[in-house]
Image (cartoon, rainbow, N blue to C red):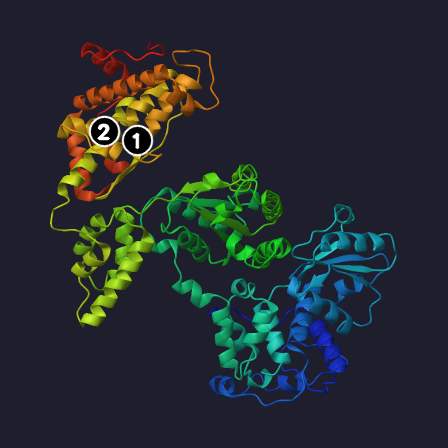
Amino acid sequence: MPNATYTRPEWTDFARRAIANLRRHHGVPASHGSDTDTNTEQKMEPVSELDALFARFDDGNENEAQAESSGLLSRYVPARQLLTAIRLAATFGGSSVYEESRLCGALSVISDVAPSDLNAVKDVLKLAFPHTDWTLVAPDIVEGKIAKNAQDRFDAAISDHIDRIEPVVVLQAHGVSLPRYLLATEPQILPIAPVSRDILVAYTQAGRLADQIPDRRALYTTLPDDVDLAHLGTLDVCAALRAPTLRMALHRLDTMSGNNNAASGPRLEDLEGETPALTAARRIVEDLQSWKNSQAGWHEISRSLLLYGPPGTGKTYLAKAIANSATIASIDASFASWQAKGHLGEMLAAMKHSFTEARRLAPSVLIIDEIDAVGSRSDGDRHASNYRTQVINAFLGEMDAIAKDEGVVVIGTCNHPERMDPAVIRAGRMDIKIHVPLPDADAILGILRHHLHEDIADGELQALSHLVVGRSAADIDAAIRAARSDARHARKMLSVEMLHQQMGIETSGEDDRILWRIALHEAGHAVAGAALGLGEIESITITNESGLVQRRNMPHESLISDIEAEITYSLAGRAAEKLVLGEVSAGAGGQEASDLALATRAAIHLETTLGLGHEGLVWHAKPEAVHLQTPAIRDRVRQRLTRAEQRAGVLLAQHRDVLEALAQDLVRRRSLRTRDIYHWLQGISGTSTVTADKCASQGVAPEHPNLG
């Protein structure tokens, strides 16, 4: 619990007068008493029965008082009205600001009101502050949400009163904005006070649990921090304080404010490694802390992040860890959950509600899972295109609006960013875009240690982490749960063998030949990439089924030599198999994203769309069809691929010792990062020119645009 010293708020007397007015309206009897506070206080008129309780606040035993159930009057001010009255008193800060709002020509704005609180605010302003001549202007609310077309009616209502002399109070709720002409008048804008310890002390003293408070200072220091309480809504507080005892109410407040959830949820501090995604996540948390400490402006930090990659790689887990490490709230959303609400209007209302909730809880993280479901307005499928366009336009509007407000970081997660409308992922809407691959051995070791450090020796976990490469974090987590279930049913201790079985790990050595071939294939790409100077190799991962090389592409001029180097790189894995094993497998071909598919596509485009082929300045709208229908082009494409593979073979032969050593390290460790790969490739520099000469000396024709 926080350590803090209680100081009586300046708005206390003002709040008491508002509470007294509410009590009179609801027929709650008032009683006179004295306050034991050391400061001299001006007594309110009329005096409520609260004063009679103050004399008991500093007496008695705290444990006994907080454990007893209350049995007070049977009639009370409604809880929401009571809390709202205190928050409004704190918003005005005292009677002076309140009196200014009542002057002729005064224009005041109470901003940041949650839509679900708007009706209560209007009622309390009329009941607790009844001697006012002001006019209230507020957006329309339907079932606790901003009504459709509320913005237009809100603007019209303000314009009707802007040129009148009567004082006006505008209630600006999340989801509606103030007109530009209103802002030009520089109105008195009062953000509604969030729930805080001061407000809860006043609320508890005025409510049903008042007789259980031994000392207001003790209550103040027992409450959660203001940062955590600010995330609570009116109903959260009222529900928590329905508890029969003060002790139970404090426990509920602590739970609802997120203290326990944040402690048990994922945190970046628990994740090991230096992946681009983790680095970006840590930087966002650092920036948020700088902003919260007023060391950086909101416009100076990154406020949005797109995490994309294969399923089960922990993208949502990472997003939640960002919120927990930054000690701010997180709001979960998705297009699927929005669309589940019903027709288009209901779907858009649900979308707006998520963004509104993120603003209400700010600082916060809005997590939009499977954000690629937003689709694209350029999608060739015309079915429901009008619906899709309206959804995308509304989403873009929400993203633009929330970018103007301080305190909300938007994180999207998806598997297929290429399916999204370009306007959604442009800078300003998604500032940072990070690929989240399957975890490497180091990341897997962190996961295993987190779950199994009390069950399995660390040396065994390290060995297991290499064998598990290629599986997602979700797969590993499921396998661990299944292995624990096996251990319980067998009444045995959890063992590595049980984990092997659940993870499908073959330890008999039958897959050694397959793994060696895959390692050679991926090492061939890495060595050729270094020799051709195509960019830093960031990671290499192999499993018993496949392998993957991540390369940071270097910018080039799109010359024919640049494109041919890429073709050579694509075929280097196949060339490595042929060089060391004497024959090639089908591993380079198959799917549309395979090595052979990429190389073939590049060669086709050289001949048909880039103006660099035998036909010179020509462009074909359907290059693949032209390739299939034109024997001469098919021959030239095949020649390019053959020569590129031969060139790759010559390159790899020059560095065969590095090729095989790198492959052996891959077999042992299953995944390598930049620093490990650099150890093997640091002696290799771009040698494409030398290689071309050597290719010519071995009977391989030099590569040039005209192959006819």
Instruction: Report x, y in % for residue 100.
Output: 79, 61
Q: Dots 2 and 1: beta carbons under 8 Å?
A: yes
Which numbered dot is residue 574?
Answer: 2
- Three-letter code for the amino acid on which mark 1 is drawn: Asp
Q: Please indicate whether residue 522 sits to the left or right of residue 199 in the image.
A: left
Disc 1 marks which residue?
595
Between 540 and 17, the one lying in front of the other is 540
Between 560 and 419, the one lying in front of the other is 419
Q: Please indicate whether residue 206 sits to the left or right of residue 153 in the image.
A: left
- Three-letter code for the amino acid on which mark 2 is drawn: Arg
Q: Residue at x 74, y 85 (%)?
A: 27
Instruction: Report x, y in % for residue 653.
Output: 17, 22
Instruction: Report x, y in % for residue 684.
Output: 23, 24
The answer to which of marks 2 and 1 sits earlier in the sequence is 2
Viewer can see residue 217: no
Measured in 3D between alpha carbons, the distance from the residue under mark 2 to the one under mark 1, in whole angstroms, is: 9 Å
Q: Quadrant of the C terminus?
A: top left
